[in-house]
Image (tube, rainbow, N blue to C red):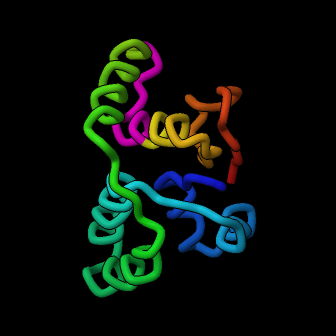
Amino acid sequence: MYCLDSYALWEIQFGNQKFSRFLTEDFVVTDWTFAEFYRTLLREYDKKTADYWFRQFRPYIRRVEIDTLIGAVLFQYDNKIRKMSLFDCVEYLFSRANNIEFVTGDKEFKNRQGVCFIQK
């Protein structure tokens, strides 16, 4: 199973085959990830487009527990030199806590355990 980050979702909506292949696999998206993706869709497109993608991904969205959120804040703090976003830290720790492979193109997560790193 895979946990897709917002980078992966963005590439899926562009039709990038490197990422859209995950749609044929078992995957989840955190509620935090989807909220970030929705915000970006609103900014770049419009509400109609954002709502379309919400309908597409809604069955795969999973809620992040508070313990994972606090862990992500601590992880981000411990890695502050890398300037990781809190959203990415949440996704990564959610993946680790649920024994799911984290799919990202964010260079800050390259070569980390449990990460499927894909560049555009």
Front residue of this view, candidates 107 and 27:
27
Tell me the quarter of the picture where residue 115 sits: top right
Compared with 77, 70 (above or below) is: below
Tell me the quarter of the picture where residue 61 sits: bottom left
Q: Is residue 67 left or right of residue 33?
A: left
Would you say the magenta stretch is mainly helix, strand or loop? helix
Image quarter of the C terminus? bottom right
Compared with 72, 35 (above or below) is: below
Q: Residue at x 42, y 29 (%)?
A: 84
Q: Is residue 87 magenta?
A: yes
Compared with 48, 57 (above or below) is: above
Tell me the quarter of the picture where residue 47 sits: bottom left
| Location of residue 75 in the rendering, given as x and y in whole percent from the top left corner | 40, 21
Q: Is residue 4 left or right of residue 70?
A: right
Q: Residue at x 66, y 55 (%)?
A: 1
| Location of residue 15 in the rendering, given as x and y in whole percent from the top left corner | 64, 75
Q: Is residue 109 left or right of residue 36?
A: right
Front residue of this view, candidates 69 and 40:
69
Q: Which residues are magenta?
A: 81-90
Numbered circles on residues, count: 0
Front residue of this view, candidates 10 and 96:
96
| Location of residue 58 in the rendering, given as x and y in whole percent from the top left corner | 40, 75
Q: Residue at x 37, y 61 (%)?
A: 34
| Location of residue 63 in the rendering, given as x and y in whole percent from the top left corner | 34, 55
Q: Residue at x 38, y 16 (%)?
A: 80
